[in-house]
Amino acid sequence: MLARQGLISDERGLLIVERSADAAPLGTVTWHAVSHGPNPESRAWNIGIALVPEARGHGYGVEAQQLLARRLLATTQVNRLEASTDVENLAEQRALDKAGFSREGVLRGAQFRAGGWHDMVIYSLLRQDVSAERRG
């Protein structure tokens, strides 16, 4: 049903993040396909999150990103998930660390926002990272 409404497709998706206690909407998680080579096996998901200000700092983002990552790895064939954030967004960097993502480096001048170019930090989570976590 969601696919027919345009919220999830083979190339991208969007889901609402809600608090389980009362189903209050807290924001959204998104994902879109990125390619690191010409073959389909080189496809990865780039994920993102947007939470309402009052939901930040309570662990909802960590949990939402963990749940999304596990869902995408369980239901698709990708080996790699990615997420990026502004180098100054330390809260999101901490959330990605807590969600199990590994910091890979800085994408210099990767995003144009608010009238200027911004550096982004890129994170990844591989299928083997989640498998090792479950074994450990």
Image (cartoon, rainbow, N blue to C red):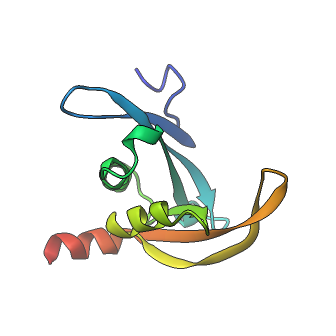
| Occupied quadrant, residue 43 | bottom right
Residue 88 is left or right of residue 118, and the answer is: left
Q: In the picture shown, does residue 46 fall above or below 94?
A: above
The answer to whether residue 10 is visible is no
Is 9 above or below relative to 119? above
* Drawn side of residue 52 relative to residue 32, left or right: left
Residue located at (61% from left, 64% from top)? 39
Which residue occupies the extreme front position in the image? 54
Counting from the top left corner in percent of width and height, residue 24 is at 31, 26
Identify the image quadrant of the N terminus. top left
Q: Residue 136 location, x and y as percent?
A: 14, 78
Q: Is residue 55 visible?
A: yes
The residue lying furthest to the left in this view is: 136
Horizontal and vertical percent for residue 18?
Answer: 32, 33
- Residue beneath the point at 58% across and 52% down: 33
The residue located at (50%, 70%) in the rendering is 123
Q: Is residue 3 above or below residue 110?
A: above
Please state which of residues 1 and 124 is positioned toward the viewer in this rendering. 124
Q: Horizontally, is 76 left or right of 85 in the view?
A: left
- 130 on left or right of 27: left
